[in-house]
Image: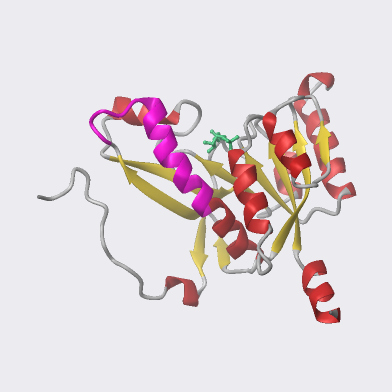
Amino acid sequence: MGAMIAAASSRARVGVLVSGRGSNLQALLDAAEGPDFPASVVRVISNIPDVYALDRARMAGVPTTVIPHQDFPSREDFDAALDACLREAGVEFVCLAGFMRVLSAGFICGWQDRIINIHPSLLPSFKGLHTHRQALDAGVRVHGCTVHIVRPALDDGPILMQAAVPVLSADTPDTLASRVLEQEHRIYPEALRRLVQGRFVIDGAKAQSVAGDTAEGPRQALVSPPLL
Ligand code: GAR
């Protein structure tokens, strides 16, 4: 029993920032239910009131805070309120999960290599908004999602994990988004797990996986359209 309590209390404390539907938050909450998951979500903060992500947090019993960005005279003042809330909650790692505000360099530097984001493209392609529309317009045959360490430049920073999906000829931004989202929900919790376990070495602009994680695995390529 004592060992179980020690294990539970040694989980990394994670704060999640959201602005909307919160399906990636849900993937993190679901993963954190696992007895061996090394992190717990201890606070969910939204910059928008009444978003569904807040309901998801409440259903999981996680404390929530709404910090409306328009209540603050500047980005730095808003970020200072975010920072204070995260620190008051004893947060160690921050996950952005559909958080649609750009964070200031000062905030990001205060959480050096401890903020991660999930972005719906294979970075460095298709930064910013409407990534699925951007991918269709560019005519790429493979698209996907990326978990990366957050750095001050938009959608930039060491890449931790990526998942690729084929682009199909009948795809619309919505059908492509749902294929990518399914993969987001797989890789985001896994990237968080590995980050808190120290399984990435951040070296400047790049992240390397530790030796065991680069072990032999399937080498099958995703070829799109498929070879017949
Ligand atoms: C996700 O697809 C996420 O990758 C994207 O917003 C969606 C949020 O969905 N994030 C960004 O575009 C950040 N630049 P969710 O609220 O259901 O997780």
Ligand 1 is found in the corner quadrant, namely top right
> Number of callouts in the render?
0
* Relative to 83, residue 173 above or below: above
- Of 125 and 6, nearer the camera is 6
- Of 74 and 178, nearer the camera is 178
Q: Quadrant of the N terminus?
A: bottom right
Expressed as whole percent of the image width and height from the top left, the position of residue 116 reads 62, 49
219 relative to 145 in the view: left or right: left
- Of 216 and 1, nearer the camera is 1
Report the magenta residues as a range.
168-187
* Relative to 154, residue 60 above or below: below
Examine the structure image and report whether residue 170 is included in the region drawn in magenta: yes
218 relative to 215 in the view: left or right: left
Which residue appears farthest toward the right when viewing the image? 88
* Relative to 206, residue 86 above or below: above
**Most prominent secondary structure in the magenta stretch?**
helix
Examine the structure image and report whether residue 209 is included in the region drawn in magenta: no
Colour convention of the picture: secondary structure
Expressed as whole percent of the image width and height from the top left, the position of residue 52 reads 68, 30
127 relative to 82 in the view: left or right: left
Q: Residue at x 50, y 46 (%)?
A: 184
Q: Residue at x 52, y 48 (%)?
A: 185
- Of 176 and 95, nearer the camera is 176
Q: Quadrant of residue 67?
A: top right
Does residue 189 appear anywhere in the picture?
yes
Q: Quadrant of residue 216?
A: bottom left
Does residue 104 appear anywhere in the picture?
no
Expressed as whole percent of the image width and height from the top left, the position of residue 126 reads 42, 34
143 relative to 2 in the view: left or right: left
Expressed as whole percent of the image width and height from the top left, the position of residue 14 reads 74, 53
Which residue appears farthest toward the left when viewing the image? 228
